[in-house]
Image: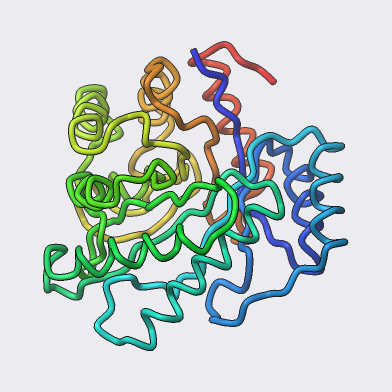
Amino acid sequence: MKRLEVGAHVSSSGGLWTAVGRALGVEAEAMQLFPSAPQSWRQTKHTDEAYERFRREHDEGGLGEVWMHSTYLVNLATDNPEQLRKSIDAVINGLTVCDRAGALGLVLHTGSHKGAGLEAFLPQIVEAIGEIFEHAPGTATLALENAAGHGGVIGHSFAELGAIISAVADRRLNVCVDTCHAFAAGYNLADREGVQQMFAEFDSEVGLDRLVVWHLNDSKLGLGENRDRHENIGDGRIGTAGFEVWMEAAASIPEIAANAMLLEVPGIEDKGPDLENVRRVKAIRADVTGVTA
């Protein structure tokens, strides 16, 4: 079985390298951070010294995988040329920061077609991703995140993500699966049969080797409600028993490329991923896989 690193999304306020200390402070083994402000088009200009210090402190701290998450403003399915241009530039910048910081890749919400359907914007999305890869340096992957299903957001089904990946045909394009989003979209992660069906569908539509990272979140709301409401691990509708079933499958299927489980939970005190949630996931991992550290 895979070890599966327990990670957390952490702030880099005060300098890129400060994220390392915050991750270590909650006993995380992997980490995710924003390359720039998540609700702004402004691209943070990290210095050479900041990248060097980040890499050094990451290595000295013994942390595993590093991922970044693109700004939430990106929409590759927009019908606004200015927003499309800003979106492409933001993703190029995000992948550039990944390359400089040594991150494995950038997680991306592809955007919303606002009810028009994926087919209407698929050529535009494919062209945009092609331009992104043409101008982004290095080999960092772009991981399209699945969606909960609200507001015409792309990726509520694995078939939609598979259609984009098939059309782009570039190995730098992969997928991040968020457990809360999957549950909200109707994939029953709280049930053994549902978990098996989810992995079978993903393999058929996308390919398990394209599943490169997890966002690990419980869900405040019920199965198939199509709303994105993250909850602390074990406190939501997936529940501890559901995550045990899910993790057993995730750790035992060798074709799955994903190793890091990145928490994006509200936290016990509503301050984001915390020590308590990290320890809950580690306890589940220990029960399921026998890995204790």
Q: Compared to 87, does 68 lie above or below? A: above
To which quarter of the image does residue 136 belong? bottom right
Q: In this view, does 127 lie to the left or right of 66?
A: left
Judging from the image, the colouring scheme is rainbow
Whole-percent x, y for residue 195 in the image:
27, 28
Q: In this view, does 284 lie to the left or right of 10?
A: left
Whole-percent x, y for residue 8 in the image:
61, 46
For the C terminus, which image quadrant?
top right
Whole-percent x, y for residue 241 in the image:
39, 27
The number of discs equals 0
Whole-percent x, y for residue 113 in the image:
21, 72
Nearer to us in this view, 127 or 59: 127
Nearer to us in this view, 252 or 98: 98
Q: Is residue 142 left or right of residue 93?
A: left
Identify which residue is drawn at 52% across, 54% down.
106
Nearer to us in this view, 131 or 262: 131
Q: Compared to 277, does 82 lie above or below? A: below
Q: In this view, does 293 lie to the left or right of 193?
A: right
Identify which residue is drawn at 61% across, 40% down.
7
To which quarter of the image does residue 97 belong? bottom right
Q: Compared to 192, does 213 lie above or below? A: below
